[in-house]
Amino acid sequence: MSDNIYKPYLMEIENIVEETPDVRTFRLKFKNNEDAEKFVFKAGQFGEYSVLGEGESTFCVASSPTRKGYIECTFRKAGRVTNALANLEIGDTVGFRGPYGNTFPVEQWEGKNLLYIAGGIALPPMRCVIWNTIDLRDKYRDITIVYGARTVSDLVYKNELKEWEDRPDIKLITTVDPGGQTPDWKGEIGFVPLVLEKLAPSSENTVAVLCGPPVMIKFTMPVLKKLGFQDKDIYTTLENRMKCGFGKCGRCNVGKLFVCKDGPVFSYEEILTLPEEY
Amino acid sequence: METTRKLIRKQSVEKLYNALTSNRQVYAPVVAADKQIEYRYNPGFAEVTFGHIRSTLSVKNVVFPKVENLFFYTNARSESTITDIDMSRIPEVVLWGAHPCDNAAFDTLRSIFCWDIKDEFFSKRLEKLAVIGLSCHLSDEYCFCTSVGLSPDSKKGSDILLSLLKNGDYHADILTEKGNEIVKSAADLFETVSDEKEVITEVKQKFSHEQVTSKLSAAFEHPFWVENSLRCIGCGACAYVCPTCACFDIQDETRGKNGKRYRSWDSCGFGLFTLHTSGHNPREVQSQRWRQRIMHKFSYMPERNESLGCVGCGRCSSGCPVDMNIAEQLEALQNI
Amino acid sequence: MDNLVKRAKELLENKTVQVVIGYEAGPTGVIRPAFITDPEKAGKLIYNDKCDQNLAVYLTKKEVKNFGKMAIVATLPVMRSIMMLISEQQLFAESIVVLGISADGNLLDIADINIMQGYIEKSDLSNPEKYKALLAELNKLNPEEKFAYWQKELSKCIKCYACRQACPMCYCTRCTVEVNQPQWIPVQANTHGNMEWHILRAMHLAGRCISCGECGRACPVGIPCHLLTMQLTDQVYTYFKVYAGTSDKMNSVLSTFEPNDKESFII
């Protein structure tokens, strides 16, 4: 690697999964073996993915660090770069810079119950830590995943949801917004906060990880508080706009922090100390 | 190294300049046809101005150009390649006649570009830069270096600092090894100091930056921001003329299959700076963006980068089309 | 000036408006816009020949509009901007009170849009004299020289977009330069990209520019970019006999088709 911190690794698209009509998951392999061997990352970190000629876009590494040799990313077609990414095919080149940012403190969580709550396209930033903890299943107590989307077709990682559902050591609750169900839908129908309230998981020795659209977070937080969760035991990731990924370009600056350096993972306790600019 | 002071006669200054331009790029201020003060590479000595208060743009572009190419690429699907920039080709530059505020800004920029991961583009350019500063013998109502811990003859950031003497000669403070090298290359031009008085302008202190910083820690929700930024039209002039503003954008530009990725100046004053793809904007209105500008420079940077994001050059205020006068606002903030 | 202060105070006191947009002298003596909401502070308002910013730019700014009904100190260019903003449906005539200022600096009695229209129609709408001379100089150059002139001037541009932000007619929330699918204009401030930006800006203002010169005044690096739009103002007048901002029902010359339009560009 040169001293040029802006130069991406070249990655080859090894596999593409069409999660929903506008969401794709890429499996990316380093073109250069040396890069692959040196590359290490931890759950929660993110990268800058690029299509040469279109620019870079920021998303979390969606695969677990326990699974070596590749990384995965999941993105929704939304802007210039993600639209260009969606037009790529297996074998095409993607640029990748990273890993950047902090990590979920999975070591600190050992011996605890884990409650993952995700909405819509916010499951991907959590998928990494979910698999990370599932792959080290012995170290954690109960693992509960609550995942909601607007409609059944908006649920991502359908194969994995099936796998998690079938595992006796994981409790998975999926839900879709009222009206978003199909005739054969067997999961819950209702908004995530309500489903969570009904489920009423214990806050005893439990860490909650919450990712989703602002409106979901807004209504889920009071439920978690009611269940007795402390601010320090609730984690989320912030998604401020970024360019460089290493605290120089100024874009993700919130208060004295940079989301790209001090985040993207924050406990709710930390978030309360930030100005509301996220 | 131990700093020394020498004398350089008026006539010798020209000789020094010509010696430097003979084998190096010298970036020096001139008065352009439209009366703007701009820096150019190797202008003739007769063109170089010694009597300017502030150049229109700061000199930050010698280390942080308005456009910096990051790498070149060929996009050919599976056969795509990247060609790195050869940073060894970054030229040696002598910055000539820049004032102490501008020179102090290099340290501020370093605190942004080199905290944590080092930005090689910036640091290589800074490494190749030698600064022959010029103390200020003139100032105007926009200057406020003394309010941000500097002075019209601050040595920070200069390798050699020239100060005008009453008789037209200059004192040369040789401050670094780089400066010493330049002096050695033209040793016969430097003489023993005289007791002639230096002409240094007086810049009145308008506020205490420590007090501003301490007030800002509790001022985020203060109505001050809306009241004092209604007239801000949200352009990037203040940020672009600022010697310490370092926010940037990264973009690709392609012709056919070939192109380059570059970074270019950006500004937190623009509405799109923080706009998410979803349409959500953490800083939706101009008062929030103006607050960010002040908070970043006077609260976040002191805490995070251990540097103040302002050197008191006054460009943002003199260049502002609607008189958003930063010193005036900081003075007011000190007393809220 | 006393009349202006008195009128502004009245409007605020009887709650006809919630804010008066005018000029004040800042602490350093520089004239700048003022937003008066308290009738007791109306005395800050001034008007003199240094009050040259086009205040109409604030009529579309969210945080100013939030106050409610606005009164605005309006010289001829401001009045013409208001006409354009109403024509382009960016402003309701009912949401403002116009404190018109005559060419010799006196307060006009502009009770409604029709009276304002009458005043505008009586005024000289061609480019201001000081700019006419500059344009005439420029027009003596041949095309190559002209191109070289603009290339040199525009190479100074740093893309701070002060020209755009200062212009009352540049109210788009997402400017064409910020559209990136496709990226019409390169983001970087190089000579080529700068020229593209300024040509695009001038073309978007052709037939809409009211010749206030605000873009050039705002430019921090001294590019006379107002001469580009003013040149087009002259051309639009030459070909279509229309000046912008003369009524509240203007059709933009370059986006309106009429059967008798000249079509000399079609071969």
Image (cartoon, rainbow, N blue to C red):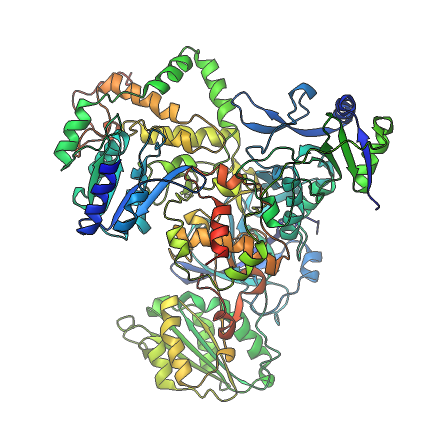
Where does the C terminus of chain C fall, quadrant-wise? top left
For this rendering, which residue is in front, C30 or A2?
Answer: C30
Q: State the image quarter where residue B57 is shown.
A: top right
Give how far across and how far down residue C145 sits, in percent.
48, 14
Indicate whether C30 appears above or below B114: above
Give how far across and how far down residue C9 sits, in percent.
23, 46
Specify whether C249 is left or right of B85: left
Q: State the image quarter where residue C210 is shown.
A: top left
For this rendering, which residue is in front, A58 or B90?
Answer: B90
Residue C90 visible? The answer is no
Indicate whether B153 appears above or below A12: above
For this rendering, which residue is in front, A130 or C127?
Answer: C127
Specify whether C66 is left or right of A110: left
Specify whether B65 is left or right of C50: right
Specify whether C166 is left or right of C11: right
Residue A176 visible? The answer is yes
Give how far across and how far down residue C112 sits, in percent.
13, 37
Where does the N terminus of chain C fall, quadrant-wise? top left
* Total count of labels: 0
For this rendering, which residue is in front, C108 or B249?
Answer: C108
Give how far across and how far down residue C232 sits, in percent.
33, 22
Taking the spot 51% from the left edge, 61% from the top edge, the residue there is B215
Taking the spot 35% from the left edge, 26% from the top edge, the residue there is C229
Taking the spot 14% from the left edge, 28% from the top edge, the residue there is C118
